[in-house]
């Protein structure tokens, strides 16, 4: 896939070669179960604890506050449902936003069907949650506020620090879905003041199928996966040792290289945004102009359908994504785009390019070269002028 | 995810455009639901002598429109009316399940164009009858 | 770890070199997200579907009935809780056995605290569940029967086929925890007549952190992981592509080689059992003499504590496990041993050797050489004669 | 999981055995709870002149018993009574948290043996008084 122009890092990233190397031995050499007593398990156990320290360092918490999971989705589900069950005696009200990832929204929906009450806060046209809205939404029976750090579709970075202050004052648990930011953008659970934070390795050059939940010491949470006594009795299941090792190594690399990578991404991102807006008529940028992920370029191309653009780009070996309904087979385009107030007919023409650490200027130039022609061809076939 | 045939029709769509002063016009879908299609036909001796399409939609929508025009071209109107959603999908060596609505759209567009032709004929017939 | 005598395959297995090889490319080459449209994701998607077919073939079901999870624990939790939520209008009674794995027992316990009623059937001294007990336990409000295929500690293989007939007649969902058997012992969901079956890759030479739930077509189940639309909308979370690929390859190898591996294991197992019983006084075999996993040797050595034996064996580079309380830091020895009616003071001296495909006669002979001396030394230090 | 020191004491336990006609005997635990320990002491001038242990239990139980005998050997009885659970664990460079109860057992066994010694002395004293 060397000639591939991969611009879908928000969906998933390739595994860093150093990460892959770190994981290598854990399939066939140090395969022991870390929970076992004998020394073969000991090596695996040490590797898991080493990874825990590295992940903790990346988000500035104590290693004992990191619980490994099978991915970001599990971390989100656990945090939402586990808080609900742990605190339901106090109340059954949850505050979240309209633009959360499904992994955080759907557990709320599940709870709603089981007697909980969910407030989904609107966002402004840039995709920002208003902290004051959170404050107003908190009631006596509110037990959880769940707001993402940065949105995966439009890239807007939310004011989680301000929200954290509000939840602390109110004594309400605060979950931050930081799946898009951890490893790609600075995350500090102390300044965020959150009680829980979800992350996923495959978004920062680690392997798929492994994630973690940060759980502030003392935060009550009912288990999602019950069984063996792993993870201090909080998350059962044999440890995904090689995955966890990979996640740890990826965290370590991110610690070291995040700043220069972000700088480079930001530059290329702005080049791509400008190039698209300049080169193609009737295009708008989605999300906040400046408070956005360094790697996110989200646009709506009017009077073109997103999937048709994706396919055309794919034929040019360019990978990106779209919030068009037709990419998922649903009838409605992405709930995020609609929550930003983008008209449905325009939301159908959304395109998301998400850059990565190996994205080059040549690749961006190439996208800018081919995209206008693709749009022109598709518009030429359309009955809507 | 798409068959080679879909990709071929998406890349090189047949019969794109609008027939000027068409004998029948079928428009289906709307921009809000993401897919829109306009089929124009020229009819000679109850046969589709020419057909063109314009589509705003996903890859499947464009490919089904394209193959539909191929399938309909030269067919008698009653036969063309029988072109089903399944026939269109089969013509493309299948479509992903969640894309079946797109083939629906194409067949609908054709049927509407033919109905439009009949309606115009009837009108003209009535007009003649009045004379 | 080449000189290691690894006899803890029931805890976890090393990854087969061919499995490792199969997974190799999925970190750095075919890293695309299988849910995406473009061709880079297509390769990943095909690999996932290929693995699904292989796993399905291994247990004789349709590929569409396989749902990938993050391990056996997730599969068990999902099956138990998902059935409870899907059927709670019909009733809130669950039938299970006293010797299930915690991954299946604990979700029942969780439900119990939330208004469900759980019957835990006893087993006989061989660890067998009596099908007639299941029949008698089923009530009008019973919604789920959960019985494992083979027990992980004592190796007894349960009469799941007969239980399957009973649950079918009664119209009650039947979950089989087959984590110990799949890939190591024949599993056929059709003859079992089960509606759900849990499996885990790392028990049959696949990677850790990936498993699956077989869900018979038409069986209703509420999601455990809500979010994106993966796995037909039933299990959210970005696919663990490399893990799933590894699981598929492991299933394929198991299909081909299970019979000879089982034969070899059975022979070595019986050799080890006989050698221990003959060579050490006051030792008893746990579990059924013949209806047992081909790789399981579980014994209780009287008047010795299990962990002390584990440690001593570890110093001889032999890895095995124990159901002794002291291995887990709990006060009670394994619930399984106690359920078999083994007195507490004897259960403390349990040892489990679980053989694998690469276990050799020399290794077994070595264990038989060193174990008697270890037992003798520890007994010599004991105040109990 | 265990420190080197634990493994050393587990592998080469010091002072295993029973002192015949001991001056004090302490037995703690029972086979049902998995750990059992018997400490026997010889006392000279209010000092532990000799000490031996027998233990049925896990690695930590054996190691704590062993180091306890080392720590107690030669100590005055009142000092030996002050050997705490934590001191035993520290002597082994720490124990895993879930093994702390084992070090408890060892200290308890010693304290019981000393109490047994005092009880015997008292009896003997009383016996003397009667004479
Ligand atoms: C914001 C956000 N939350 C949660 C998830 C789910 O993470 P995972 O795919 O690891 O389950 C994703 C990505 O898919 C995401 O972008
Ligand atoms: C019978 C049984 N069920 C469930 C599990 C849990 O599987 P996993 O470790 O993959 O979560 C295990 C093994 O740990 C097992 O032996």
Image (spheres, coloured by chain):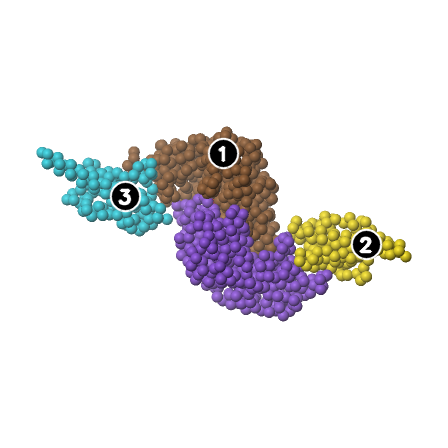
Chain colours: A purple, B yellow, C brown, D cyan
Q: Dot 2 falls on which chain?
A: B
Separation (CA) of disc 2 from disc 3: 101 Å
Asked if ligand 2 lies within 8 A of label 3, the reply is no
Element at badge 2? helix
Element at badge 3? helix
Residue at which label 3 appears: D106
Of A146 and C49, nearer the camera is A146
Residue in the picture at 40% in, 57% down = A62
Of A232 and C39, nearer the camera is A232
Residue at which label 1 appears: C158
Residue at which label 2 appears: B119
Asked whether the residues under marks 1 and 3 belong to the same chain, the reply is no
Cβ atoms under marks 1 and 3 closer than 8 Å: no
Element at badge 1? loop
Separation (CA) of disc 1 from disc 2: 72 Å
Can you see residue C67? Answer: yes
Q: Position of residue C39 (x, y in %)?
A: 62, 56
Asked whether the residues under marks 2 and 3 belong to the same chain, the reply is no
Separation (CA) of disc 1 from disc 3: 43 Å
Q: Position of residue A105 (x, y in %)?
A: 53, 53
Few, some or many residues within 10 Å of mark 2 (<14, 14–19, 20+): few
Count the marks: how many?
3
Left or right: residue A223 versus residue C217 is: left
Few, some or many residues within 10 Å of mark 3 (<14, 14–19, 20+): many
């Amino acid at each position: 896939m060397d000639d591939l122009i991969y611009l879908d890092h928000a969906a998933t990233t390739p595994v860093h070669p150093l990460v892959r190397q770190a994981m290598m031995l854990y399939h066939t050499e140090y395969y022991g179960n870390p929970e076992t007593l004998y020394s073969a398990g000991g090596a695996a156990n040490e590797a898991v604890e080493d990874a825990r320290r590295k992940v903790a360092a990346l988000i500035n918490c104590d290693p004992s506050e990191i619980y490994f999971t099978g991915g970001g989705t599990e971390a989100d589900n656990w945090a939402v449902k586990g808080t609900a069950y742990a605190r339901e005696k106090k109340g059954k009200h949850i505050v979240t936003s309209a633009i959360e990832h499904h992994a955080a929204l759907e557990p709320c929906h599940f709870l709603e069907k089981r007697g909980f009450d969910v407030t989904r806060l609107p966002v402004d046209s840039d995709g920002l949650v208003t902290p004051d809205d959170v404050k107003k939404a908190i009631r006596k029976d509110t037990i959880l506020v769940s707001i993402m750090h940065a949105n995966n579709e439009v890239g807007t970075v939310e004011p989680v620090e301000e929200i954290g202050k509000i939840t602390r004052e109110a004594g309400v648990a605060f979950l931050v879905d930081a799946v898009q930011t951890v490893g790609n953008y600075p995350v500090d659970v102390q300044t965020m003041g959150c009680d829980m934070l979800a992350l996923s390795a495959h978004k920062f050059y680690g392997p798929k199928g492994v994630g973690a939940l940060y759980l502030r010491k003392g935060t009550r949470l009912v288990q999602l996966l019950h069984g063996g006594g792993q993870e201090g009795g909080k998350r059962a299941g044999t440890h995904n040792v090689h995955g966890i090792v990979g996640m740890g190594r990826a965290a370590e690399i991110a610690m070291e290289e995040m700043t220069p990578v972000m700088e480079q991404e930001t530059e290329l991102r702005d080049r791509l945004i400008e190039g698209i807006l300049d080169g193609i008529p009737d295009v708008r940028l989605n999300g906040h102009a400046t408070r956005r992920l360094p790697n996110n370029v989200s646009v709506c191309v009017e009077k073109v359908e997103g999937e048709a653009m994706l396919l055309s780009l794919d034929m040019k070996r360019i990978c990106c994504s779209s919030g068009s309904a037709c990419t998922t087979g649903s009838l409605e385009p992405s709930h995020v785009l609609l929550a930003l107030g983008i008209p449905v007919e325009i939301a159908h023409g959304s395109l998301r390019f998400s850059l990565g650490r190996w994205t080059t200027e040549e690749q961006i130039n190439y996208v800018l070269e081919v995209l206008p022609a693709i749009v022109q061809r598709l518009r030429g076939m359309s009955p809507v002028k | 995810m798409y068959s080679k045939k879909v990709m071929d029709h998406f890349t090189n769509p047949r019969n794109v455009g609008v027939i000027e002063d068409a004998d029948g016009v079928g428009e289906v879908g709307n921009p809000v639901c993401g897919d829109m299609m306009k089929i124009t036909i020229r009819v000679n001796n109850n046969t589709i002598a020419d057909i063109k399409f314009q589509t705003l939609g996903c890859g499947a929508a464009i490919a089904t429109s394209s193959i539909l025009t191929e399938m309909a071209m030269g067919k008698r109107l009653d036969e063309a009316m029988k072109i089903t959603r399944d026939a269109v999908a089969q013509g493309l060596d299948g479509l992903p399940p969640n894309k079946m609505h797109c083939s629906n759209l194409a067949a609908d567009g054709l049927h509407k164009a033919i109905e439009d032709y009949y309606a115009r004929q009837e009108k003209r017939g009535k007009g003649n009858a009045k004379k």
